[in-house]
Image: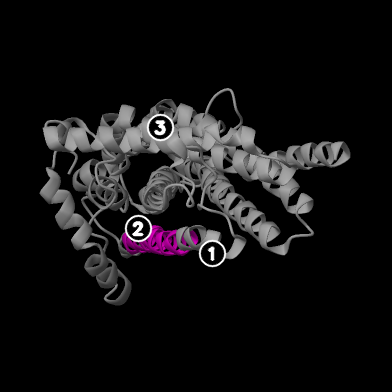
């Protein structure tokens, strides 16, 4: 699919709900990784946000992609120019919160623009088990326990697919409602536009230019929806890459257990174990590649999450006398909490599952009776697994629940400082 044209991505988008219902109701196996859907929605559903090598060969697609980048950049610029008009802490905090959020979205969109080809490689790497390991790893004698292990692997694959697809549907539905709330906000608060901006010739003032104001209103609503759906699929692509890594590590543990249950001689055991080691090494290289490709995006996520949680919480307290304004900041705070929680939870799954590989290798049945070479290889694998795999944007800490706790503690300290300064 990485080399597919626009129509192939369109067919994938159209078939998403049919495939999802088939896996959910008929309990069939997932036809592909859910990551393919995120990529397809970025290509088609979000209109030209994913310019990989193949799609850039289409000049129309390339120009549409550049237009989308410029449009989001102009949107951010108009919001930034309006900060100096803020007359109080609440209005300025509102502008700053939106600037941080839009900057995070734009940063991730630019990273997709720069790294689309590498992301294609990551998606293919995460499908290593189905494409390479499984077709070339048939034991000469399949025991009943092996069939149970294979069924367990299929259950985990199906569960992962359903979780990812359900999250995609749920988050997109929520963001549609969230953007609608942003769009109708001026009708409730009495402001002129959903976002506080400055435009040339006073186009944003309804009294001076009513027609231009209506156009700007619609432009802000559409661009906001575009940005929200963009970060939705970009974030889910990154988070679900974490989940697929954890899934591959889980499958690796099952394959180790299945190998230990087989009655194999030393030569055949060594061959099968080497294939498992290659699978493990491939997972390690994939984690390193993801950390390299998404490093800037990971750093931006950490910084933005810290700033958004601190600012939105502070603004909630500052606007406590105005329930409408406070409710908006509470909603933004909850969204940021949920977003960071999902990142850190997925990263923790990778961290913990990578350590379980060592235990799975140690639990291989009667491995101490094997040849010296096999024992040495198993010990090497156990030793390597003592270093957990983590997703992180160096020099920042990894995405784990421990980091999540640290961020919340630091946010509380900043919040206390801001509170004292009021």
**Position of residue 345 measured from the top left corner of the image (x, y, whole percent):** 56, 49
Residue identifier under label 1: 187
Residue 392 shows up from this direction: no
| Residue 27: assigned label | none
Q: Answer with left or right where residue 127 lies relative to residue 216.
A: left
The mark closer to the camera, 2 or 1, is 1
Q: Nearer the viewer, residue 401 or 29?
A: 401
SS at mark 2 in the image:
helix
Label drawn at residue 290: 3
Q: Is residue 229 left or right of residue 86?
A: left
Determine the secondary structure under disc 3: helix
Q: Quadrant of residue 294?
A: top left
Image point 22% across, 69% down: which residue? 18
Of mark 2 and mark 1, the one earlier in the sequence is: 2
Return the residue at label 2: 157
| Residue 294 at least partly seen | yes
Range covered by the magenta-colored residues: 150-178
């Amino acid at each position: 699919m990485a080399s597919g044209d626009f129509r192939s991505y369109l067919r994938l988008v159209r078939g998403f709900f049919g495939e999802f219902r088939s896996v959910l109701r008929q309990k069939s196996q997932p036809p592909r990784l859910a990551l393919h859907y995120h990529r397809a929605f970025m290509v088609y559903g979000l209109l030209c946000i994913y310019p990989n090598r193949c799609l850039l060969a289409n000049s129309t697609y390339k120009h549409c992609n550049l237009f989308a980048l410029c449009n989001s950049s102009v949107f951010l610029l108009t919001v930034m120019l309006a900060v100096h008009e803020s007359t109080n802490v609440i209005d300025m905090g509102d502008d700053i919160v939106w600037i941080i959020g839009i900057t995070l979205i734009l940063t991730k969109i630019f990273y997709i623009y720069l790294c689309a080809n590498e992301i294609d490689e990551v998606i293919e790497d995460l499908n290593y088990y189905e494409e390479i390991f499984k077709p070339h790893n048939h034991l000469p004698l399949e025991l009943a326990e092996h069939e149970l292990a294979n069924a367990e692997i299929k259950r985990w694959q199906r569960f992962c697919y359903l979780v990812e697809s359900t999250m995609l549907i749920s988050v997109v539905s929520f963001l549609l409602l969230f953007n609608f709330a942003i769009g109708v906000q001026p009708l409730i608060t009495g402001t002129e536009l959903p976002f506080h901006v400055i435009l040339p010739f006073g186009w944003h003032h309804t009294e001076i230019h009513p027609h231009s104001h209506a156009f700007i209103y619609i432009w802000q609503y559409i661009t906001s929806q575009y940005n929200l759906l963009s970060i939705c699929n970009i974030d889910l692509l990154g988070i679900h890459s974490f989940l697929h890594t954890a899934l591959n590590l889980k499958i690796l543990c099952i394959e180790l257990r299945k190998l230990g249950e087989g009655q194999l001689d030393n030569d055949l055991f060594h061959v099968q174990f080497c294939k498992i080691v290659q699978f493990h090494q491939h997972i390690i290289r994939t984690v390193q590649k993801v950390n390299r490709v998404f490093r800037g995006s990971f750093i931006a996520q950490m910084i933005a999450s810290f700033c958004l949680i601190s600012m939105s919480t502070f603004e909630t307290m500052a606007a406590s006398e105005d329930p409408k304004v406070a409710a908006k900041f509470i909603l933004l705070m909850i969204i940021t909490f949920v977003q960071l929680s999902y990142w850190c939870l997925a990263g923790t799954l990778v961290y913990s599952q990578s350590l379980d590989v060592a235990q799975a290798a140690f639990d291989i049945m009667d491995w101490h009776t094997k040849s010296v070479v096999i024992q040495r290889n198993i010990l090497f694998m156990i030793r390597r697994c003592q270093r957990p795999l983590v997703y992180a944007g160096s020099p920042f800490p990894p995405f784990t629940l421990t980091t999540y706790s640290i961020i919340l503690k630091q946010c509380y300290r900043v919040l206390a400082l801001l509170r004292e300064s009021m």
